[in-house]
Amino acid sequence: MKNIILFKYKKTLFFVIFSILSCYVFYAYIYPDMQVDKGKIGKVVDQFNGVDVYYNGSTGNVSGRNLTKDGYNLGQKYQCVEFIKRYYYQRFNHKMPDSYGHAKNYFDESIPDGQLNPKRNLLQFHNGSPTKPQVEDIIVFGWSRYGHVAIISKVSDNEIEIIQQNPGPNKSSRATYPLIFKDRIWKIDNFRVLGYLRKNK
């Protein structure tokens, strides 16, 4: 009798867990794609310093590769990487020596704070640096296996704002995060932030 009750309990528990996981998968991965306005893909949704941000729909959507007239690879349209590389190309005529890689690969943990990241030809700062983030820095997030990159659009003593491309079909192109200064160290208060990159002027 006890074995039968235990079996029924395990079966019910399995069903509950399976249902919860199924709901999570649906709302995290399937439902957002159902909400995509496909007619809006490739349309301008924001702009910063004259550089456009385009709507991409679902985060995995790709609309072909974007190359400059001189053949420099900006990335897949309209992924987050494509925006930050296009921004630096248009604003600073900057070309990364290594123009490929997922978003989180743009930050190299092995490089000391404030030193040159040779693959990107940009100064690299860890999240938790004596050097304060600046407007137009590239911020690198480590979430998911691909990561995410954006441009810092505003900085105060207690907050930063970012502008981003491809945050998801229903998310804003702008987001803010607390900025903390403690023991002479600046830290963006989000555990997913790896650090930020900057043009060496």
Image (cartoon, rainbow, N blue to C red):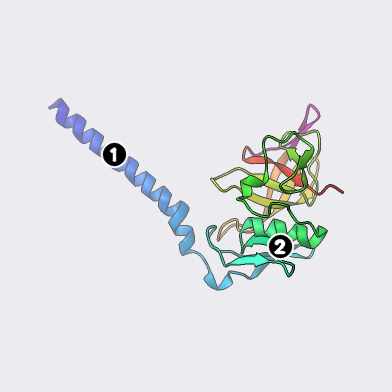
Mark 2 or mark 1, which is nearer to you? 2
Q: Quadrant of the N terminus?
A: top left
Label 2 secondary element: loop
| Magenta stretch, residue numbers | 180-190
Could you say which disc has been placed on residue 28 in the image?
A: none
Please state the horizontal and vertical placement of residue 36, each as a whole percent of the image. 51, 65
From the image, give the main secondary structure of the stretch colored magenta. Answer: strand
The structure residue drawn at horizontal position 53% and vertical position 70%, both measured from the top left corner, is: 38
Q: Amino acid at mark 1?
A: Phe
Looking at marks 2 and 1 on the same chain, the residue that comes earlier in the sequence is marked by 1
Distance in Å between CA atoms under marks 2 and 1 = 52 Å
* Along the line of sight, the residue nearer the viewer: 65 or 83: 65
Packing grade of label 1 (10 A; few <14, some 14-19, many >=20) is: few
Establish if 196 lies above or below 10: below
Residue at the extreme left of the image, as rendered: 1
Could you say which disc has been placed on residue 72 in the image?
A: 2
Packing grade of label 2 (10 A; few <14, some 14-19, many >=20) is: some
Residue 56 horizontal side relative to residue 183, left or right: left
Q: Which residue is mark 1?
A: 14
* Along the line of sight, the residue nearer the viewer: 196 or 14: 196
Q: Quadrant of residue 92?
A: bottom right
Q: Amino acid at mark 2?
A: Tyr
Q: Is residue 187 magenta?
A: yes
The structure residue drawn at horizontal position 46% and vertical position 63%, both measured from the top left corner, is: 34
Q: Is residue 89 magenta?
A: no
Label 1 secondary element: helix
Q: Is residue 37 visible?
A: yes
Please state the horizontal and vertical placement of residue 95, each as a whole percent of the image. 76, 56
Please state the horizontal and vertical placement of residue 184, each as a whole percent of the image. 81, 29
Q: Is residue 158 visible?
A: no
Q: Quadrant of residue 128?
A: top right
